[in-house]
Image (spheres, rainbow, N blue to C red):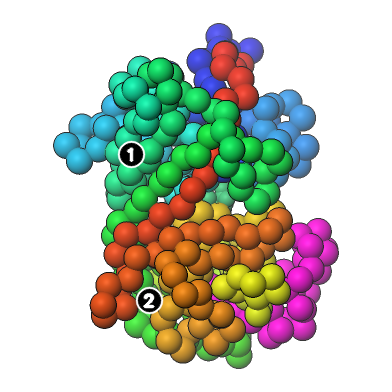
Amino acid sequence: MGSGIPAMWMRGGTSKALYFRREDLPDDICSRDQLLLKIMGSPDKRQIDGVGGSDPLTSKVAIISSSEDPEADIDYLFLQVAVDKAEVSGSQGCGNVLAGVGPFAIERGLVRAEAQKTTARIRMCNTGEVAEVIISTPDGKVSYDGNEAIDGVPGTSAKIQIFFSNLAGSNCGSLLPTGNVTDILDGLECTLIDNGMPCVMIKASDFGVTGQENRHELELNTEVKSAIESIRLKAGSLMELGDVTKKSVPKMTLVSEPLNGGLLNTRSFIPHRVHASIGVFAAITVATACVIPNTVAASLASLPDGGIYKIEHPSGCTKVRLDLDDNGFIGRTGIIRTARKLMDGTVYS
Ligand code: NQM
């Protein structure tokens, strides 16, 4: 057993992650990844010998340090630790885990708390953009308690406001990496798009499903899963992501008409398990696809009157804000999340 590393276990949005200071982990990437696999208990589908929660949404790591970028206060690197494979991937960011980064940075003294609310500028090292995050800090301390509810998490917590700019092409270099609003892959019409997360949108009905199935029903449908994976591997290279066999992107989003007054109904393969709700950047990317004429998503979407877009998913809906300019271009985007400190201490490998 190793000598132990300081870490904080937090819920960020609808995910859970271990949060580390960068200085507490090895600089060498190979040694760091081996250590993280051991800590999480991977590869093992139960992660029985580690702290991971046997689900991609609870097998996540955030690494935080002061930033040398004058535009940012702190740097945040997100790592997805695979559950049943010995793989650690930084090929995507995570907007849910991002919700815990500001509170962690304040708790560790990397950002000084203000009297009521504290704004932290967080550089997302996976993709390079800077997010602005507003954290509730009454009396100069992080408050996790509050009245904000987000679907997919029971109860309420303090509100964390998150704003993004310039997410278009964060991973793929451009919003529509093929230059088309739709492409035909394996005979099906798909929209390949990246406004924060590379996503492939396809109609659920094209796979003979309704899009209202729960995550377990979809995960058991091996025929649909292999058809989706075949499209994903082709889409990866078309989206400038290279060979995505071992990458967690692009996300595969089955879309259908909204059922509960929202924008669109979704089921997201991330990419092999089905998301219990939807990722933050994936939700922003879905909303973006809905406002671009002739995409697969736009053909099913019911656009709202204001700037709040409600993406329906298996646990309810995720609301995102899109600010459109007079020409319909997307400027700032935003979301409200919550986070909670679950444990602060020493983790062993
Ligand atoms: O899209 C899961 C999550 C995510 C990512 C995933 C996320 C995002 O919900 O910003 O938050 O899609 O792998 O934590």
- Residue type at the position of mark 2: Leu
Is residue 26 one of those drawn in magenta?
A: no
Residue located beneath label 1 in the image = 122
Residue located beneath label 2 in the image = 176
245 up-or-down from 71: above or below: below
Which image quadrant for residue 188? bottom right
- Would you call the spot at circle 1 few (<14 residues within 10 Å), some (14-19), or many (20 or more)? many
- How far across and how far down the image is residue 66, in percent? 29, 27
Q: Are marks 2 and 1 in contact (CB under 8 Å)?
A: no
Which residue appears at 37% of the width and 59% of the height? 333
- Residue type at the position of mark 1: Ile
Q: Quadrant of the C terminus?
A: top right
Q: Tell me the element at label 1.
A: strand
Q: CA distance from mark 2 to mark 1?
A: 26 Å
Examine the rendering and report whether any part of residue 269 can be seen.
no
Range covered by the magenta-colored residues: 197-225
Which residue appears at 77% of the width and 78% of the height? 209
- How far across and how far down the image is residue 262, in percent? 61, 70
Which image quadrant for residue 266? bottom right
Q: Which mark is residue 327?
A: none
Which residue appears at 52% of the width and 44% of the height? 337
Residue, far left: 70
- How far across and how far down the image is residue 174, in percent? 32, 70
Q: Which is more toward the observer, 115 or 205?
A: 115
